[in-house]
Amino acid sequence: RENANHTLQTTALINEAYIELNNQHSVKWQNRSHFFALSATIMRRILLSHAREQAADKRGGNLLHVSLENCELMTHEKSLEIIALDQALERLAEHDKLKSQIVEMRFFGGMTVEETAQSLSIAPITVAVHWRVAKAWLAAQIRGDKSCV
């Protein structure tokens, strides 16, 4: 669900995630949902790493990069948004690990409410409620409203 002009294309993200998943030798896979939950975590890390690279102005900084597929450069602002989201998500995890997991699975993993509920062994309505609250909390944190704790 990343922006269409993101420099890390979907196929590249999936390729990176596959390589990481393939290196997970100590994981005892429980079910399909467990696989998707771990995939969401890995994709979050990959996107965050990519955003940090973009924000750090490395490898040419603000110069226009042109790939073979004519992809446009991820904007500096978009990189900063992803980093801000990650920082807010880390703060959310300190206060409510369940909400953090739900956001990670839904936002980064693209899982449905039902898939998330199955993965976490909770009711879909619980996922939906936590999802709404977490989105509002994260939005307030990103805007800088520190009163929402």
Image (spheres, rainbow, N blue to C red):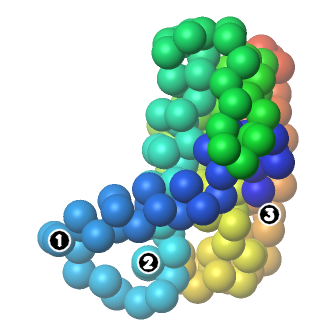
State the residue position of label 3: 129
**Mark 2 crowd level (few <14, some 14–19, many ≥20, 10 Å Cα):** some
Mark 1 to mark 3 CA distance (whole Å) = 35 Å
Compared to residue 57, the image places residue 50 above or below, namely below
State the residue position of label 1: 25
Q: Is residue 16 in view?
A: yes
Q: Which residue appears farthest toward the front when viewing the image?
A: 68
State the residue position of label 2: 35
The tally of labels here is 3
Mark 2 to mark 3 CA distance (whole Å) = 24 Å
Which of labels 2 and 3 is toward the front? Answer: 2
Counting residues from the start of the chain, the first of labels 2 and 1 encountered is 1
Quadrant that contains the N terminus: bottom right
Q: Is residue 84 in view?
A: no
Q: Specify the amino acid type for callout 2.
A: Phe
Left or right? Give the position of 33 relative to 64.
left
Q: Nearer the viewer, residue 27 or 145?
A: 27
Give the SS element for disc 3: helix
Q: Which residue appears farthest toward the bottom when viewing the image?
A: 31
